[in-house]
Image: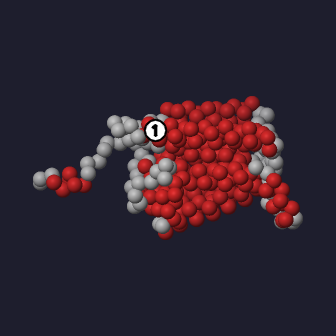
């Protein structure tokens, strides 16, 4: 529990620091990944945020060693509250009433997933069949990259309204969902004895290579999206998709059984359905009124 709360804090701080750093950088694009990396690596603030995120991944490894996948996701999503508070305080981002209701509904949906857990029946799985992991992860990665590219093409239309980032959040969330499953897989190889053999077995598994792919693509895609959109919206959407992906597909892939109690099963299925429906109904365009440029304000006579 302490490791999960620490991961939440590190993730929230990391995303806010990166967003603040990106606000002072020239516009970045996924079509120029080398330039993007050069710009962000030259920002000490961004490096501090990325180190916080890396430490959050380390804490996540500990969580997956001790908690069932669905339980871990329920705790991770509680970090959205801290993220929204930090975004409002440090970034000056304000959410609309509709967005606040949507975020509250998402938290309620994931709370239903947590309430569906049973400490006496839930077990922590350590392994999953490699073909099944690849069958889940490869199409998900392809869907995430395609969705992000589709959002990019629509965003380039000259007369398109400003996007809220929901599509970007879903796309990056799919990539991070695969990364979360890979972290779960890596955690099963953590051992205090036979370190050499554990490393060899890990390198024979698909998990380190999934982490490398999602790390590289996730870095480029998330930074471009984070610069364009509000962290207080895109990160909660991304986190929700990641948590649902990991809780549902991770539970099935690693063989952690669904609840046998009808009430707990209904809570888990209803929570998942509610979160997905909220994501589908969230506004795709920014509903906040556009702020006049500073220059226009200065030219307005008293």
- Give percent across and percent down for residue 75: 64, 50
- State the quadrant of the N terminus: bottom right
What residue is drawn where x is 72% and y is 59%? 62
Element marked by disc 1 = helix
Can I make out residue 89 in this image?
Answer: no
| Residue at which label 1 appears | 153
Image height of 231 relative to 255, above or below: below
Looking at the image, residue 147 sits to the left or right of residue 268; the answer is left
How many numbered circles are shown?
Answer: 1
Report the residue at 51% width, 43% height from top.
168
**Rendering coords of residue 46 (x, y %):** 50, 63
Quadrant hosting residue 107: top right
Image side of residue 32 versus residue 191, left or right = left
- Percent across and percent down for residue 204 are 81, 53
Q: Residue furthest left?
A: 302
* Image x and y of residue 37, in percent: 52, 60
Q: Is residue 191 visible to the viewer in this orientation of the structure?
A: yes
- Which of the colour schemes (rainbow, by chain, secondary structure, one colour) is used? secondary structure
**Image point (58%, 34%), residue name:** 276
Q: Is residue 116 left or right of residue 51?
A: right
Up-down: is 153 above or below 21?
above
264 vs 66: above or below: above
**Residue at point 78% right, 39% down?**
132
Other residues around mark 1 within 10 Å, as few (<14) / some (14–19) / many (≥20): few
Which part of the image, by quadrant, shows the C terminus?
bottom left
């Amino acid at each position: 529990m302490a490791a999960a709360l620490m991961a939440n804090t590190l993730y929230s701080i990391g995303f806010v620091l990166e967003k603040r750093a990106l606000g002072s950088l020239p516009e970045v694009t996924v079509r120029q990944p080398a330039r993007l990396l050069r710009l962000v690596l030259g920002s000490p603030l961004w490096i501090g945020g990325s180190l916080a995120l890396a430490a959050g991944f380390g804490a996540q490894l500990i969580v997956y060693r001790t908690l069932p996948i669905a339980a871990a996701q329920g705790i991770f999503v509680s970090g959205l509250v801290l993220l929204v508070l930090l975004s409002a305080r440090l970034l000056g981002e304000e959410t609309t009433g509709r967005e606040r209701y949507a975020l509250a509904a998402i938290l309620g949906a994931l709370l239903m997933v947590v309430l569906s857990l049973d400490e006496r029946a839930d077990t922590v799985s350590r392994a999953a069949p490699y073909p099944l992991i690849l069958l889940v992860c490869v199409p998900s990665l392809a869907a995430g990259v395609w969705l992000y590219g589709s959002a990019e093409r629509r965003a380039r239309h000259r007369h398109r309204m400003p996007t809220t980032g929901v599509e970007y959040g879903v796309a990056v969330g799919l990539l991070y969902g695969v990364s979360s499953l890979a972290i779960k897989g890596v955690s099963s190889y953590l051992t205090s004895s036979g370190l050499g053999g554990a490393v060899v077995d890990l390198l024979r598994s698909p998990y380190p290579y999934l982490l490398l792919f999602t790390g590289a693509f996730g870095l480029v895609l998330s930074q471009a999206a984070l610069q364009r959109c509000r962290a207080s919206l895109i990160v909660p959407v991304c986190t929700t998709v990641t948590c649902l992906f990991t809780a549902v597909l991770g539970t099935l892939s690693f063989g952690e059984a669904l609840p046998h109690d009808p009430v707990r099963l209904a809570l888990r299925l209803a929570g998942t359905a509610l979160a997905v429906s909220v994501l589908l109904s969230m506004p795709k365009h920014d509903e906040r009124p556009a702020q006049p440029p500073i220059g226009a304000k200065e030219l307005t006579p008293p």
